[in-house]
Amino acid sequence: MIFNFARNKKCNLTNIDPQVGGNSEDPSVVRTFLEYYISLEKPGYAVMISGEWGSGKTLQVNRVIPENKRVNVSLFGLSSRDEIIASVFSAMYPLRSNLKKKGRNYKDAGLGIFGFDVPLGALISAGVEFIKENIDKDKIIIFDDLERCVMKGSDLFGVINHYIEKHGCRVVIICNESKVSDEFIEIKEKLVGRTMTLLPNVNEAFRAFSEEISKGHILEIIRNNQSIIVDIFEKSEAKSLRILRYVIEDLHRLLSTYSKDHIKNKGIIDASLKIAVVMITEAKLGRVSATTLPTPANILLELKEHAKKLVNNPNAEDLPMTLHQRYRHVNFYENLFNEEALLSILIEGNFDKLIINRSISENYVNFAETTKTKTWRLALGFSENNDEDNKKIFSSLMEEFNQRKYEKEGDFMHMFCMLFLYKSIKNSEDILYQFERECKLYIDDLFLLGKIDAPRRNDVRLSRSFEGQAYWVDDQYSNNVSNIRQYLEDKKKEMAEKNIPSQCDFILSLLQEDPERLVRIIKNEEYEEDEEEIPEGIMIHIQHDAFFERWQKMDPRNNSYIIELLIDMGEGNSDRKTWMEGLMNYIQGKFSEMDDHVALKWRRYIKYIMFRLGR
């Protein structure tokens, strides 16, 4: 192939001359020209790769030039000729053995402390003239962050030109040319023989970033969905490929929290991946906060607000895009992540395994006919139903209400909201208030049957959606629904109090039979879908004498589990500390009733626990 690259001519990747196109792996002219340039023995000029920050310039260059041929030098913050020369030498000869070999006559250079990262000051003290002339011409010098160098343009030109003219080096300069000083731009043509403006290559960046992930089933899932991830990234209009890297890393982290059953379930992966990529991308772009999480309820609210703004401002181009407009192919109403899970993933960043898997279990719907025909689901589609069907649907929904058909919170809350919508047609506050009272009676009946669940651990607030569908709440009856939600929350707390005695008995049985599981439950260290749901503060409700009695009967080989649990409680809040200290005092009070060898053992346990707590 004959290359005829004009010097000082910018090249945009949207206009590529076919005769200089790259191979099938990378069709960009940037790759093709770099392969040509590094094959030259003494080109006599530098190549500049320009592009926006985060556009993948360094990634592109590093993928073309082999690692053992690269001398990467960041100009960020460098302010003198000597610093640049020392940086080049340090990158070219990183190993101490090489430095000793090259600088055997410079005994005062402090070679013994360099290791792999050679301090610039020490190198400069070794003799600038010596290190300036020791150049490995087989390597390609890559100067990055040109726009962040604080040297005068003419001085910087002189240093770089020294390597090109005197040593015949091949030099690649990476920068955002729009940010480079005017002084350097004016003298650039004497130094730079080819400038190429790089547009992001998202697919190549995806491949490079995914290679950094440990191999396994999760990596396979991510790679199999490359087209979806790239499409969402491009629709987000993110300018930096660094955002793509963060998205891939967080997606891998999220999928790693899935339980074995969830990660193997193709339906769950298909249902959650698009939403996950969108919400992580939006969060990385700073478009998501704790109050604007992409829940079905917030998406619905966003659409309502957008519609109101359109009434006042018909020019839609002046309005920011909604999530629906930006990602039209994503169904935000079938979201497996509830508000609590979204907070954990996007705001707190702790990717809580328990919260995430519980959300998936509660919201995943295998859209079988039985699920599709739930009456409240049919009612949600009222705007698309004919009048006769709607009459039958709402009549059936009222009948199900009277029969107390739904016992699951999400089902009966959807039913309440749709019936409120139906009753709001009369535009009567009395009718709405009366129905609010009837909904509370519905909750009372479930409570008496023990069908109201106690608050689950880590619950922040009652959910505003269920099975991927936001509750339909209009302004007209929003206060009524809020009152019902508060009433339900109070009943859940009341149920928690009611469950305490049986839960204490359960904990005591585990203390003797399975202390390892006891610790796992109390400390909330892992998630099992069938795990007993126990409130975090249950331990303080257990009587000290009952706890000590079961502890004495436990296999002594399992003592370490309980000792670590008590140390953990001693480091907890005041209630937990008080309970643990009370237990220690109770056991000490029993020493007089024990044989000496038994008391010696328990005294040792207590002393170790208090020592670990620094008391």
Image (spheres, rainbow, N blue to C red):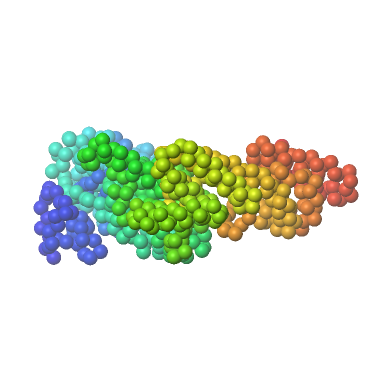
**In the figure, is residue 79 to the left or right of 527?**
left
Image quarter for residue 215?
A: bottom left
Tell me the quadrant of the picture where the N terminus can be found: bottom left
Judge whether residue 284 can be spotted in this image: no
What is the count of numbered marks?
0
Q: Which residue corresponds to the image point at 36% horizontal and 49% vertical from the top-left?
A: 281
Pick whichever, 140 or 218, lies toward us.
Answer: 218
* 273 shown above or below 428: below
Tell whether 456 sits left or right of 603.
Answer: left
Name the residue rendered at 51%, 43% in the picture: 435
Q: Residue at x 37, y 53 (%)?
A: 382
Q: Position of residue 168 (x, y in %)?
A: 20, 51
Among the 4 quarters of the image, the one containing residue 420: top left
Is 97 on the left-hand or right-hand side of 194? Answer: right
Q: Quadrant of residue 475?
A: top left
Q: Where is residue 341 in the image (x, y as percent from the top left)?
A: 48, 49
| Spot occupied by residue 322 in the image (x, y as percentages of width and height) | 31, 45
Answer yes or no: is residue 24 visible: yes
Instruction: Residue 568 in the image: state x and y as whole percent.
Output: 66, 45
**Quarter of the image where the C terminus is located:** top right
Question: Residue 161 vs residue 330: left or right?
Answer: left
Picture residue at 30% right of the left edge, 53% below the top: 328
Query: Residue 384 versus residue 592: which sits nearer the camera?
Result: 384
Q: Which of 360 and 65 is in front in this view?
A: 360
